[in-house]
Amino acid sequence: MNRRNQTGSTPVTPKTYTKAGRLALALSGATMLSGVPYSALAQDGGDDATTATGAQPAPAPAPAPAPAPAPAPSANVIRTISVSGAERLEPTTILSYIRMRVGQEYTSAAADEALKDLGATELFSDFSIRNDGGNVVITVTENPVINRIVLEGNERLKNDKILPEIKLSPRQIFTRSKVRADVARIVELYKRQGRFAAVVEPKMVQLPQNRVDVVFEITEGPKSKVRQINIIGNEVFSDSELRGEMVTKQARFHRFFSSNTSYDPDRLAFDQQKLRQFYLTEGYADFRVVSAVAELTPDQEDFIITYVVEEGERYKFGKVEVDSQLRDFDSDVMSGNLPMKSGDFYDAKIVEDTVEQITELAGRFGYAFADVQPRFNRNKDDLTMDITLILRQAPRVYVERVDVNGNTLTQDKVIRREFRLSEGDAFNSLGVLRTTARINSLGYFQENFEVSQVEGSAPDRIILEANVEEQPTGELQFSAGFSSIEQFILAASIRQRNFRGRGQTIGLSLNYSQFSRSAQISFTEPYVFDRNISSGIDIYRRDVNSFNFNNRDRNTTFEQATTGFAARLGVPLTEFMSLVGSYTLNYDEVSLDENLFFSDINGDGITECDPLLAGRFLCDALGDRLSSILGLSLTYNTLNSRARPTRGRNVSLSTEWAGLGGDVRYLRFRGRAQQFWNVANSGFVFSLSAEGGTVIPLQDRGGPGVDDVLLTDRFFLGEPQFRGFDIRGVGPRILTQPYVPGPDGEPVPITDRDNVRDDAIGGRNYYLARAELELPLGTGARELGLRPSIWMDVGALWGVDAPLLQDNPNGLQNVDANGNPLFIETGTNDEGNVIQFSTINPIAADGVTSNVPSVRPNSAIREVFLGNSPSPRITAGIGVNWNSPFGPFRIDFAQSIRRVEGDDEKTFTFNVGTQF
């Protein structure tokens, strides 16, 4: 930017005059002054001289004094101001930026001021001022217009992360100050990503019509890691112990995926607080961090952080008491129940928790604004800390009003009916906590929603506010899986959990695999006629197929088609307990492929289910039947969220009685319990769950090897309930092994699981338990919605009566209609062709050679009954939940630790869905 101050006219130089010269100048001036009036008078007198009297003219009067001459205009007075070189800007606009005006005196100071005014606009790359005899000319060269912003070399930070953060943008005026600011901003963005070696070089590409492209060439450099954390001054605790308390970690190979190994100034300040908290919990009340310095290594790749600390002395609790100013709380009683005792090592965390507990206790008694102030008295002589917890006077509070804000779709009543406090009620902090948990459990609003408490119109009034942020409640889910039995499994469902904003749930689900196909429509109304009574109905059709393998070929064994509906009605018994009654009506059709499993067993031309081919357990399950089932369940639920609980308990007990009409009779009992803990509010969520059930038959189906509970009414266990095992992969099963000729010609059974028929037959009893620990991740991973966990499952399925088994190395011989065994005889027909036919004659035509027995096809088999054991199966593994851009995603890797012979294992599962 150039600024020039120019004067076009020649400056006037003062003249030096002599004394004679001054006298001559005065005389000439006098002559001129006297000559003008004299000529005028002479002319008049001439006229007068021509008068008749001829009298002599009167004497001329004394001349009047001449006026002083006007001074010549100065060359430094501004007469005009013009602008040269303007293209986009109007000259009048440019002149409005300066304080120089026509009529003012042109000086160097005024010109410099005008130049500064032009420079402050940042609109010009070059400008100058020239004075040409009072005509001031301002010459400008305008800054170019930005055509586009180009980022080059940015891989870790994409354009959509950088461009919104910089000032320059297309169609703006290019200025160097903005470029410098944008360079600094981009470098700062990379520093936040831990890349302190990032370099940004701006370049300008000149275009026609005074336009430019601004190019930022970025060299990102490596991510700056924390190479070393040094701690100076610590004597009681080792460096490794203190580093373990910090969020920032040293870069090591095993922390390859951790984001906490990069340097972050905010994290450095947070770690100082973490150190102080740690020492305060250990009794070191005088601890302080003297300094914390982060030094960048010369190669600008890593940081070395050094803390200088003073540990101080360790304190114990001295006199600890409560001073209550509330009449409902006795100071002595409360002092005797404090968790900290005199002589214990001082722990600031216990003091903090105690303050919260007393505040919460006061809130339960209606003191919403109770204030607990701890007063500390440090005794340095005996190293004790006296603490007095002062519970200050506060009025009892009543709920003045309940406000609901932020809901656009959800009706007010859906939120208000979850409040455990109403207008006019005495305030109770437990009621507020329960209200928060119930609204969170709806799953309609933002995570970690809390009911706000606002002071009312009087000191004893409070306003409860539910400031909600609605989130999608529609779910469109697609699931996929793979198993060695079924290959790919596909499922789709659509559900709206807040239908029409009324809190109703409506859904449709479809499932397809080579194992099963199903469709279901469901509807739930949580508040019937706005009363705290829930109801729902499900209408469904389920087609379930069971498979086996024959030389790696998949065959269908039986098919079960169930058509029915279920209706339910629930009523609350207490705040946390509810009772639900249900009625289910099912029509089941169980069938087998007659081409594969039916034969003329008796030789009378009538085909029927052949136990040899299908198994006795399958033949017993065939037929159509109607099931009429009454159910009752009792549920106790204190979970803080139905969708993603982190604390609380859920226990349910249920029973089903099949026998109110219909064709089946049994009693079924089930129990389930879950418990969640947020471990020390650290982000770790630990959960335990257990469930079990049993079926008691109420009818005698008779016959050896026939279980009184139908195959279709038994329990089955495996994926997805029991991770690490395939669908129906746990529990009683029958393996049908075909015999083949061995090396010596003797029949031997095939034992390869891929080449035998594997039929799961279910059980009467089961149990399943699970322990899972959800692991917290860094900020970046949490923003991605990643929630990894480690888990262990334990379970078993058993209790079915052992079926009658086949073991026929040479197969079963055919019989005729009268039950006589048949043999194969060779002969000739009328055309003279050799044929084989069955006969009851065991002796050949020659009377010597025995005929070969006529063997039923596929009858050379051995059936093995496995898995009917309550012995626990144990699996463990890792899983990850991910709220991906295309929906919730779950993946599990499992390893079996203990299994029973016959169980079918599975290592990998996943499913995926989406929301709208």
Image: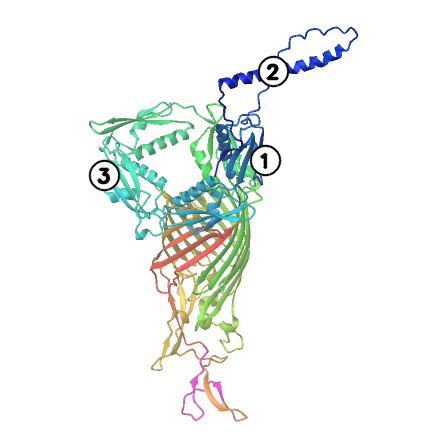
Q: Which residue is mark 1?
A: 91
Real-space Cα separation, disc 1 to disc 2, in angstroms = 52 Å
- Mark 1 vs mark 2, foreground winner is 2
Q: Nearer the viewer, residue 690 or 500?
A: 500
* Left or right: 289 as drawn, with respect to 636: left
- Mark 3 vs mark 2, foreground winner is 2
- Mark 3 vs mark 1, foreground winner is 1
* Mark 3 vs 1: CB contact within 8 A: no
What are the residue bounds of the magenta stretch?
A: 835-857
Q: Nearer the viewer, residue 794 or 802?
A: 794
Q: Earlier in the sequence, mark 3 or mark 2?
A: 2
* Left or right: 350 as drawn, with respect to 646: left
Label the magenta part by its dominant secondary structure.
loop
Q: Secondary structure at mark 3?
A: loop
Please tell me whether residue 839 belongs to the stretch shown in magenta.
yes
Residue 263 drawn at (x, y percent):
34, 44
Residue 124 drawn at (x, y percent):
51, 39
Real-space Cα separation, disc 3 to disc 1, in angstroms = 71 Å
Q: How many C-alpha atoms fall within 10 Å of the one at disc 3: few (<14), some, or many (≥20)?
A: some
Q: Secondary structure at mark 1?
A: helix
Residue 857 drawn at (x, y percent):
46, 78
* Mark 3 vs 2: CB contact within 8 A: no
Q: Which residue is mark 3?
A: 234
Q: How many C-alpha atoms fall within 10 Å of the one at disc 2: few (<14), some, or many (≥20)?
A: few
Real-space Cα separation, disc 3 to disc 2, in angstroms = 109 Å
Q: Which residue is mark 2?
A: 31
- Mark 1 residue type: Pro
Q: Nearer the viewer, residue 643 or 776?
A: 776
- Mark 3 residue type: Asn
